[in-house]
Image (tube, rainbow, N blue to C red):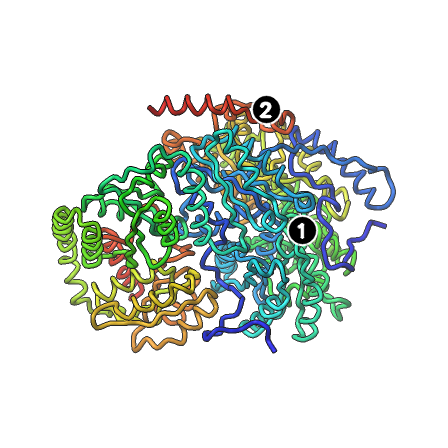
Amino acid sequence: MPKIKKDKNGQTNSINQVRYGCALGAMHSVSAIPGAIPITHCGPGCVDKQYMSLSFYNGYQGGGYSGGAVPPSSNLQEKDVVFGGAKHLDQLIEASLKILEGDLFVVLNGCIPEIVGDDIGAVVARYQEKGVPIVSAETGGFKGNNFTGHEIVTEAIIEQYVDKYAQDKETKKKGLINVWSELPFQNTFWRGDLTELKRILEGAGWEVNILFGYGSKGVKEWLTIPNAEFNLVVGPWLGLKTAKLLERKYDQPYLHLPVLPIGAKQVAEFLRAIAEFAKENEVQTERFIKQEEKEYYYYLEYFTDFYAEYWWGLPAVYSVVSDAAYNLAINKFVVNQLGLIPGKQIITDHTPEKYHEAIRAEYQKLAEDVGAEVEFVEDGYIVNQLLKQEDYGHKPPVIFGTSWERDTVKELNGHIVEVSYPVSYDVVLNKTYIGYRGALTLLETIFTTAISQSA
Amino acid sequence: MPKKINLDIASVEQREQRLGTIIAWDGTTEELHKQSSYELRGQRERGAGCGGNCRLCELSGPFTQGSVCSEQMVECQAGNVRDAVLIQHAPIGCGGGQTVYNNIYRNGLVMRGYKAENLRIINTNLIESDMVFGAADKLRQSIDDAFERYQPQAIFVASSCATGIIGEDIESITDEKEAELGIPVVPLACEGFRSKHWSTGFDATQHGILRQIVRRNPTKKQEDLVNVINLWGSDVFSPMLAHLNLRVNYVVDLASVEELAQMSEAAATVGFCYTLSSYMAAALEQHFGVPEVKAPMPYGFAGTDAWLRELAKVTHREHLVEKFIAEEHARVKPKIEELKKKLKGVKGFVATGSAYAHGLIQVLRELDVEVDGSLTFHHDPVYDSGDQREDSLGHLNEHYGQVKNFHVSNRQQYQLYAFLQENKPDFLLIRHNGLAPLASRLGIPAAPLGDEHIAVGYDGIVNLGETILEILAHKKFHDDIKKHVKLPYKKWWLEQKDAYILAKHPELVKFDADEYRAEQERKEAAHA
């Protein structure tokens, strides 16, 4: 009798072709905040593995100010395992404060301290008491993936830093919103995407705490989280936990919009839903949509000739293999804007079970007349088996996936657009695939890929 | 009799225990060589002599940045065998390496003329409850998955920090599965915390291969076959060895399990870097009777000449070698003279693994590139054979002169700043990530030697010279970015001349709450 149960797709405990990092990988959520620096308490290879996979061989995103080879790490050794590593961490923090220039330090632990029971909270508390902007996050790698880690880190910063240092937690500023959306670095295009997200929200009249990336004012911006009128969660599930925390803590309502908007239709729906929820900015929202659509359709009109009469065949059926946020977003766009036909859709981010049903329901109504089935799979071997078994009709499909799908796509003679971690064959600076501008870029990418293979 | 490598136990003996490896040191290459006392240590391994307790001094301070672990080196070797599967008995975070080494594997395959394909590494995905109850069944399941999915010729099982601490009995499961499946199922002990230096991971992989894959008592010998212990580098050894009527058996990366098994049939074993090849080459000689070519590594004229002569001697091809050497010298020397003119006055800095760095510095000096400073990630005072002909640091000092600012620094970016201020090089040669990004922000370009064979042999001198010229041209980019970025290090640290000051004076970082507050206030005021 096998002791490990297989699910309906044949998935066991095995994970081949990883599609996310571990909880410690959320050190990237720290380095994504301008001015914040992660301090890691873990084995010698943990930081390098998370960085090289989630950031380097994923669009070659780089380490920036406080990622890459910069984060302090205790590089735990046998003696730390035997005697405990709390003192080692204490020394490391002390030295880090002397050597590194940061506005906020976030201490994250890996598997080793979590198993041997180092009390990192107690070590960090001693510095907190002395007025050092530092927080601790228990991100032992076996606790979950980097999506889980992101929520742990976010909550730690809110509870241990924002709550302590925010000067005014009562006042709510009309029109100010906190945005919780893509997972930095895991989503290869997060930088460009958050910039575009901020742009369209500001265009519609909102003041935006985007919190991560270039558009964030960094740690100072985090201190204004309690002042927001409400929290906006964009995506099928990530961020909901944080929004609920803030609802309890600062009495802030939240709006959950599962579809990360790509293209004119989705963006308009998105912006109108926000205006309607808050009963604010209705006029500005309409004005902005009108103005943006003018530009969007200017370009789309010129694209029409290609899409209407390109002789040599364009793909019709597609599959998306990605995290939940991009998966649903791309599905919505390619069905509604292009009229592509959904094949197998696979979500790979270990979406918590409790959100599955709501997400499946979203796929049932991709358009009024189009629905799709979605699978939740994490093992890349199974992912690729499912892709190979799918019937795509007489033409090869376009697969929106990861670098792991390259072999399968070659076998299917199809087209690959790498949209989800790991994206190892794209160099990404500020590229976005969302909003108005990102939608146009996505069209360019899809069809450049498709036709460059034709002759 | 030399002290034999012990293949009876499943776990490899750590490099620091076998060789006295260190990861932090500062001085000149001559001092390091003297303190390493290669000869004495070699003798101690022969059970005589007075190596005694002459441990190398090692600096250890309160600050470190993320390094590399042994398991990563297992992934980049055992995970890159063409018809095997590697299982990581580990939490999902260790699986991050799958992405990294897949890139290396795919590029490596193409570089060697194979079709690109994904590597086959499976993570057992340990979670919190497994830390309490153990995860033997998950390991069994993943071994079964590996076997069913890929029909591999061998399955490797890498341990992790987590399984090491909770005491998973991996060996009994691999034994059980090996009997059941009829292929080698090889446990590799590579917990990251067990060794201070990740090169132990090379040894762990090689140990497993030697124990369970290399053919014992082979029925035939292949007198023209030479094991080349390397990574995924381009095929520069075949053309070179063809002049001696020898064929190449590349191991471990990109080899098949059969190619690993036939190592015992070869006429000799060579490597491009003793850091990598020391363990397996010595064990092949001691346990399988395949002689290791004990010579300086094939870098620069002196190194390559000596290496070829020794290879010819071991394989009984002395009659072919002198002609080849003479022809090669004549062929590359004019090109090197041209390169020397272009590289006149240029200063380089090497930042790579240990023995490899010694080889690269030799090549730079052949090109008349100045090398005042360099760093290695670790230092082995002796290699496994204990034979003095492999003393790569001694060879460097003797034939090419010493390096006066020589540092052992295990991928510590914060120290590199002071090294570069001291040396002011025009370029860096690097392997492994993490250092070039800082150099770049200081306006210094780096040549990442992803193809580790680029500097090997006579052509290697030319290749490296040309690579340096290309990299120097990139300087425009680095000079520009330098003006537009702020480093994360405080002024206090950037002003330190001694990169090891914290090891000598740890009290310097003592936390002073008043001082910290005053500094914060100054920062606030400056912002306002």
What SS does tag 1 mark? helix
- The disc labelled 2 sits on which kind of residue? Leu
* Observer able to see residue B335: no
Identify the mark at residue B277; answer none if there is no mark: 1
User: Disc 2 and disc 1: Cα gap in Å?
Assistant: 40 Å
Q: Where, by quadrant of the figure, is residue A344 drawn?
A: bottom left
Tell me which residue sits at (16%, 53%) in the image: A296
* Residue A105 image offset from top left, x and y in percent: 47, 37
In front: B458, or A38? A38
Residue at label 2?
Answer: B508
In the displayed structure, does residue B397 sit left or right of residue A283? right
In the displayed structure, does residue A299 sit left or right of residue B150? left
In front: A146, or B61? A146
In front: B298, or A368? A368
Of callouts 2 and 1, the N-terminal one: 1
Q: Is residue A430 above or below residue B138?
A: above
State the quadrant of the N terminus of chain A. bottom right
